[in-house]
């Protein structure tokens, strides 16, 4: 059964992710981090690890890994990976998220935290020029 509130929240999350992406880097949300050929490079290894954890139901562990990696290396690639990670989570319904101890609100909170981290990062880059 389709839940109108859940659909609304999903649309809001998608809009938030796109807005954050364009505010921080003046770019649209990337279509996919991992290539169609399935190539895993240094730039997309984090995305691969996150997807593997999400697919096994370890969403909280995946989110912790994401923030640990971003704290160590705040790159544009990691920013895109973060947005794709939350986009993938947003595709899951609320029941599935609850099964893995996660929620749509945690997706929104995570996106807001990514925005905060990268706004600070963006400001420090501008100040170093």
Image (cartoon, grey):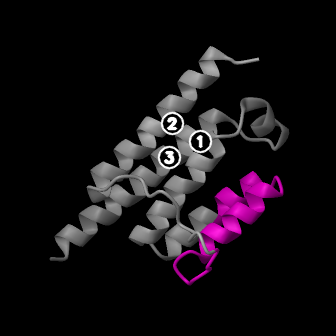
Q: Which secondary structure type mostly characterizes the magenta part of the structure? A: helix
Q: Which of the image's four quarters has the C terminus?
A: bottom left
Tell me, yes or no, whether the two marked residues, 3 and 1, touch with CB atoms within 8 Å: yes
- The residue labelled by disc 3 is 111
At x 48%, y 68%, the residue is: 78
Badges 3 and 2: C-beta atoms under 8 Å apart?
A: yes
Tell me, for residue 61, which label it has, or none. none
Give the Cα separation between the discs numbered 3 and 2.
Answer: 8 Å
**Residue matched to label 2:** 13
Q: Quadrant of the N terminus?
A: top right
Query: Mark 2 or mark 1, which is nearer to you?
Result: 2
Q: Secondary structure at mark 1?
A: helix
Please give the range of residues in magenta. 38-65
Q: Which of the 4 image quadrants contains residue 15?
A: top left
Q: Residue furthest front?
A: 37
Q: CA distance from mark 2 to mark 1?
A: 7 Å
Residue at position x 64%, y 74% from top?
38
For the residues marked 3 and 1, what is the alpha-carbon distance in whole angstroms?
Answer: 6 Å
Q: Is residue 48 magenta?
A: yes
Whether tag 2 and tag 1 are in contact, CB under 8 A, the answer is: yes
Local crowd size for mark 3, using a 10 Å CA cut-off: few (<14), some (14–19), many (≥20): many
Q: Quadrant of residue 108?
A: top right
Mark 1, residue position? 107
Query: Residue 52 magenta-drawn?
Result: yes
Give the vertical position of 88 relative to 15 (above or below). below
Q: Residues within 10 Å of mark 1 (few under 14, many from 20)?
A: some
Taking the spot 75% from the left edge, 39% from the top edge, the residue there is: 97
Task: Indicate which disc, 2 or 1, sits on the residue closer to the N terminus.
Answer: 2
* Element assignment for label 3: helix
Q: Indicate the position of residue 85 as horizontal and vertical percent values.
A: 59, 55
For this orientation, the residue located farthest to the left is 129
């Amino acid at each position: 059964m389709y839940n109108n509130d859940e659909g609304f929240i999903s649309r809001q999350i998608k809009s938030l992710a796109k807005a954050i992406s364009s505010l921080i880097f003046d770019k649209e949300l990337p279509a996919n981090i991992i290539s169609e050929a399935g190539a895993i490079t240094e730039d997309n290894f984090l995305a691969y690890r996150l997807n593997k954890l999400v697919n096994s139901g370890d969403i909280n562990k995946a989110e912790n890994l994401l923030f640990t990696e971003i704290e160590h290396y705040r790159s544009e690639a990691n920013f895109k990976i973060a947005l794709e990670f939350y986009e993938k989570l947003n595709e899951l319904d609320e029941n599935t998220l609850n099964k893995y101890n996660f929620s749509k609100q945690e997706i929104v909170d995570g996106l807001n935290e990514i925005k905060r981290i990268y706004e600070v990062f963006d400001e420090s880059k501008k100040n170093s020029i």
